[in-house]
Image (cartoon, rainbow, N blue to C red):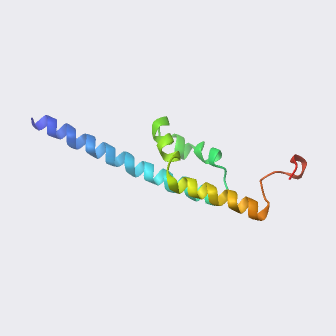
Amino acid sequence: MASSLVEKVQAFMDDLALDVVEERIVEYVIREVRNGRKLADVLNDPYVKNRLNEEKLNHVIENPEIAAAIEEQISTAFRTRDFGFSDSQGS
């Protein structure tokens, strides 16, 4: 009985730790996107890749705050007409 309780507490603590890591990754991704980096580039950063498995990464990508940061980036690109193309690529 005691070992069952210990296992449940350990599982809870593990989930809590993962949530904190996920939260920090979300904050990092939002900050980097708002600084003008592309989402794909940010998601390929070692900081992100080394901390999340594919399932958790998918969960992070679904975060509404990340979607809002991307929408903000797109809106800024249209407002400034800066789509990240060089002159030779047809801006």
The structure residue drawn at horizontal position 66% and vertical position 53%, both measured from the top left corner, is 37
Picture coordinates of residue 4, whole percent (x, y): 15, 35
Please, which residue is most extreme toward the bottom here?
79
Position of 30 compared to 16: left or right?
right
Residue 35, can we see it? no
Picture coordinates of residue 66, whole percent (x, y): 55, 54
The number of discs equals 0
The structure residue drawn at horizontal position 15% and vertical position 40%, both measured from the top left corner, is 5
Picture coordinates of residue 75, whole percent (x, y): 69, 60
Picture coordinates of residue 29, whole percent (x, y): 56, 53
Asked whether 47 or 16 is in front, the reply is 16
Quadrant of the image for the N terminus? top left
Position of 38 compared to 82: left or right?
left
The structure residue drawn at horizontal position 38% and vertical position 49%, both measured from the top left corner, is 19
Asked whether 74 or 85 is in front, the reply is 74
Asked whether 73 or 45 is in front, the reply is 73
Residue 24, can we see it? yes
Please, which residue is most extreme toward the right here?
88
Position of 18 compared to 6: left or right?
right
Compared to residue 42, the image places residue 7 above or below, namely above
